[in-house]
Structures are given as structure tokens and as C-alpha cells.
Amino acid sequence: MTEPPASATAGWVEQALREHEHAPVADREQQVLDRIDRARRRRPKVREERVTMSHGAGGKATHTLIEAVFLDAFRNPLLEPLEDAATLTVNGSRLALTTDSYVVSPLFFPGGTIGDLAVNGTVNDLSMAGATPLYLTAGFILEEGFPIADLTRVVASMREAAAVAGVRIVTGDTKVVQKGKADGCYINTAGVGVIERDVTLGVARAQPGDAIIVSGPIGDHGVTIMLARGELDIEADIESDTAPLNGLVAALLDAVPGTRALRDATRGGVATILNEIAKDADVGVLVSEDDIPVRAEVRGASELLGIDPMYVACEGRLVAVVPAEEASTALAALRAHPQGAQSAIIGHVTDADPGMVRLKTAFGGTRIVDLLVGDPLPRIC
């Protein structure tokens, strides 16, 4: 494809700027929204020649890589929803199947280890499909020289986490690579669960008026990992929120069977989930900064790090979309469970500005919350 001459490009930019300057404020905002919408609706294309750390951050680069490479190659109706787990029907039974890999650094951090993180993360992905998690696999990629004592500690944390979640690790695999070819220990898991309730969950099911709920303070895990690396001279009393969410999900679905969607706020944080809701359901999302629970320690550390807690990963928090008329019931059910005691309604689905997420700031204005572009927190799970 022939590139347009530089003069033509410059002329287009100058014309757009002139139109923007002379348009009323409301029209200017709409022009920006229209351009963002057009950009989002273009066919995904990976423009980089090589994989970068941003491709694993959960934001724009990750979504582009998944849609332009993996989804394009493997496209089928079971994969296309891109939910946390695939929903399958086998001999009349509904099952959920998921897989994940864990490369967190460091392997041991306040509140958890790579081992319990792997178990909890897989349990949670199954739970977001409305499934009761049953069985897990565990694959280990170990670097030559990795201490057996550390491996034993990792495995023990997995055993304990599986017992808490009520699942069994039933098969696995072990590979060893040369020294310098890995980072101590990587873990791959898969999980299967049974969907016993008559529920169908997915962010594409969100409808205008629906309430959006988060199950507790956000950003704990990502900030904990950053501080645990010891690269920054910052001390804070923060622990990872890693935990299994199957009990919390069961309580919510018992109270509100009509729940529209569930997502656990891992890579890319709550902001990414809100954007997925807006895009997949073709709706607008409006949330209030004052209503989003963030611990003071997390907010303070985030400000020092120059990051927004909205984009920071959690490993024990979920985002739920529920019908407006059942929001109070859902909130009460979540708050009645120990893991949801600080649940909060943070916003609503709207029919304005489809595909956009807007945040009411603490100062009274609004701003667009877009997908993450770079990777401020690499290797947090």
C-alpha cells in the first residue's frame, strides 16, 4: 500500500485542527469520541515486528495480539467470547475450561507465592463462568539450579490453596531448562469445573441501566509485587489480595441468578474490564472515582510510582454487572461474605457513547478511561 505524501498528511492534520478549534466545546468532545470510536472499530493489526512486554500487560497491545494473531488463527464460537473460561457442553452437562501461566517476579511476596497465585487464579477464572471448580493441572518449567527448598515451598502453597478452594490437582508436567533460560520457576495450570446453575455470563450481556460492582479495594496485588521487588525505596503495609473467589461467586449467584457478567480484575485492572464491557456490549460505562474502593496505602504508593490504581492488577477481586433492580440485593450478598465485605457499586452501564468508559473525577469533571497502552507493572502474575 502506497503511503500518502507528507504534505497530504500535514494538510489533513491542519484541517482537523482548524475544525476542532472553531467547533463548540460539546462538538469538540464529540469529535474526539468519534475518532476514538473509529480507531477502535478498525480490524486489529499487530504493527510491531517483535513481541514486547506491553503485549503481556492486558491492555491495548495484549488485545491486539490476541485478536489479530490467536483469535484470527483459532476462531470458533467457543473461543470468540474471550471470557475467562470457555463454556462447553459434554453429554448434556455444562462445563467450564480454562488455562493460565504464571511468571510472577518475585516468586514469594507478602500475602502469597507463585504457587497459591496459580491455584487461585485458575479457580477464579472458572468461577467467573459461574462454574464450581473441580480439578486442576499443574505444569512446572524449572531453571537448572533452582533450590529444591524453594520448589517445596511453592508446591506446599499450592496444596494449601487447593484445599481452601476445594479443588484437586490431578495431573501435571515438569520440564527443566538450562541455567539462564528461565527465571527460577514458571507454572502453567488448567482447570475444569461444572456449571450447575442455569446462568449465562458474559460482558456482552451488559445492558443500559445495569449496575457495576467491585468486590473490594483494588490494586493491592500489583502494588505489592512492585514493592516486593525492592527496586524502589518505598515501604508500605500492603499484601497481595490473592484468594479463591468461588465461595463469593456462589453467594452472589444464589442471591442474583440474573447476574449479567463476572470478571476477575487481573492484568490491566478494573479499567480493562470496564473497557471490555463497553466494547463487547456496545454500551457506555460511567463510573465514579469517589465510589471506587482503594486502600490509602495503595493510593499513596501508586502516586509515588506514577500509576493509576484503576489499571493495577488484583488477584482476589471481581467485577460484577447486575440488573439495576437487583443491585442492592447483589451488594448485600457480596458484603455478607468475608471476601466481599468492602464491595461497592462503582458505576452503571449507559446507552450514551457506546464503547466508551467515562470516569466522574473527584473534582466534578469527567475523563475517558481507555485501555492501558504501556506496561507499568510487568510480570505481576
Image (spheres, helix red, strand yellow):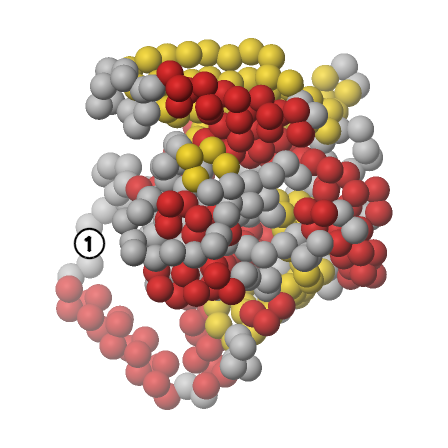
Q: Is residue 261 above or below residue 185?
A: below
Q: Residue at x 55, y 18 (%)?
A: 137
Q: Residue at x 70, y 25 (%)?
A: 166
Q: Is residue 229 above or below residue 94?
A: below
Specify the quadrant that holds the C terminus: top left
Q: Residue at x 46, y 77 (%)?
A: 29
Q: Position of residue 25 (x, y in %)?
A: 46, 86
Quarter assignment of residue 52: top left
Q: Residue at x 46, y 11 (%)?
A: 173
Q: Is residue 323 above or below residue 242?
A: below
Horizontal side of 148 relative to 237 (left or right) equals: left
Horizontal side of 35 relative to 184 (left or right) equals: right
Horizontal side of 139 relative to 50 (left or right) equals: right
Q: Is residue 82 visible?
A: yes
Q: Amino acid at mark 1?
A: Glu
Q: Nearer the viewer, residue 263 or 133?
A: 133
Label 1: which secondary element: loop
- Residue indicated by mark 1: 3
Q: Residues within 10 Å of mark 1 (few under 14, many from 20)?
A: few
Q: Position of residue 131 (x, y in %)?
A: 71, 31
Q: Position of residue 156 (x, y in %)?
A: 52, 22
Q: Nearer the viewer, residue 340 or 329?
A: 340
Quarter assignment of residue 128: top right
Q: Is residue 259 visible?
A: no
Q: Position of residue 373 (x, y in %)?
A: 36, 54
Horizontal side of 171 relative to 247 (left or right) equals: left
Q: Nearer the viewer, residue 79 or 141?
A: 141
